[in-house]
Image: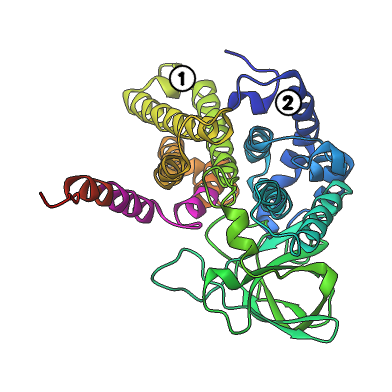
Amino acid sequence: MTHDLTGERLVDDMTEAERARAERVEAVLPALRAAAVKADEEARFPIEHVALLRDAGLLGLVVPEKYGGLGGTLRDLAAATFAMGTACPSTALAYFFHNTSASRGLLPLEAIEAGLFDDGEIPAVRAFAEKVLTRMASGVWLANFASESVKSSTANITIATTARRTDGGWLLDGEKSFGCATGVADYYLTTAKLEGHDTAEGLVTFLVPRDAAGVSTRAPWDGLGMRATANNGIRLERVFVPEDEALTVPGAFTRMLRMSRGSFVGNQLAIAAVYTGCAQNVYDVTVEQLTRKTFADTGRPIASSPMHQQLIGEMTVQLETAYLWLRRQLLLETSEPPLRPKPEVFRQWRMGKGSVTEACFQVALGAFKASGTSGAMMGGTAGRALRDLAMGLVMTFPAERGRLEVAQLVTQAQENALFATAERP
């Protein structure tokens, strides 16, 4: 089956409106692809991509039209990050994190409609949510900073950055160890905890200008992963944020998460789409190269050898495995009415994230083996994909943690079913 648009390789039942939005993505792919090799080599985010995506209207892809956006959904975002992942995975990843910022606007508004905020809280919650969305739609790039280097044994993400009240606003102190577009984004959407709070009820959100006093960049990130994401992280030392640039209603963060369809803030599968796009590209390039090159003695394509046939077959299975998990999760998180209750959708994602990223890494590993020593170049397609896809094995949580959580959910549910209570006769 052929597809006119790259995104249709993942979302193959696009509506006319979705195809129109996907055409905007398709138009920027040549420029992303042309810059990818140099960006990886220099470990530098191509700053020109900001204007490229802004001019295409794509910074507002998932912002409702009423706020000036394109009105796309998770289906559009998954198709977009997948397509960009085939061209420049680093840009695709940074773009994904920009779009996660929209959840800080969309989910609070849904929570208001669901009656989760009282009349006194609604004005502040609505104002902040709409500010996030209108800025994104206007072409403002938001970097979403949540992760920190501090870890706890009970959570995937631990927040130690602290917000304390001061005249006219808040002072932030802390360090964010992970977040694409450091020094690139216009604002850092920063998650912190209110001083004196030790639970998720104290989590709050701020819009921090890139050049605000007290904001500095951590040491350059030279990680085993996508190298051109500007993923250095930031330090915050007594950074002042005005009252109207913050959402500090206690419990607002946890209440908005209740509106998510499944994965955390409801868009995490689009990061797995980045990895799947990268895997699709290395697969396509490798098969094309092995089919075009021939053995000197027989003239037959290298791809026809039994060893290469085995590797290509395994790569094909792994790639299709990634698609199956990703498409199933996309269906569960976007179908109307919902096909499964939220706990089941969440459980599916805890399995699916690791299954997708491990399968994608196996595609790159197969390409590396099939390409031989001549293909084992840091700047080659296989070498770059191997490094790019390695990050998927650990980002947010590794597959082993997701499977452990699923096992606990399954066994606890079974225990509850086996050990029921009954009235005394």
Residue 163, horizontal then vertical, whole percent: 68, 80
Residue 347, horizontal then vertical, whole percent: 40, 45
Q: Which SS class for mark 2?
A: helix
Name the quadrant of the N terminus.
top right
Magenta highlight on residue 161: no
**Residue linked to disc 2:** 18
- Identify the residue at image location x=64%, y=50%: 93
Residue toward you, 264 or 9: 264
Residue toward you, 39 or 268: 268
18 is higher (above) or lower (below) than 248: above
Residue toward you, 193 or 418: 418
Residue 180, horizontal then vertical, whole percent: 67, 59
In the image, taking residue 267 as reference, residue 57 lies left or right, namely right
Query: Which tag is nearer the camera, tag 2 or tag 1?
Result: 2
Q: Is residue 209 visible?
A: no
| Crowding at mark 2 (Cα within 10 Å: few <14, some 14-19, many 20+) | many
Q: Quadrant of residue 159?
A: bottom right
Q: Going from the N terminus, do you reach mark 2 or mark 1 first?
A: 2
Amino acid type assigned to the residue bearing label 2 in the image = Glu
* Residue range corresponding to the magenta coloring: 388-410
* Spatial CA span between label 2 and label 1: 39 Å
Q: Are marks 2 and 1 in contact (CB under 8 Å)?
A: no
Task: Please tell me whether the stretch drawn in magenta is mainly helix, strand or loop.
Answer: helix
**Residue linked to disc 1:** 301
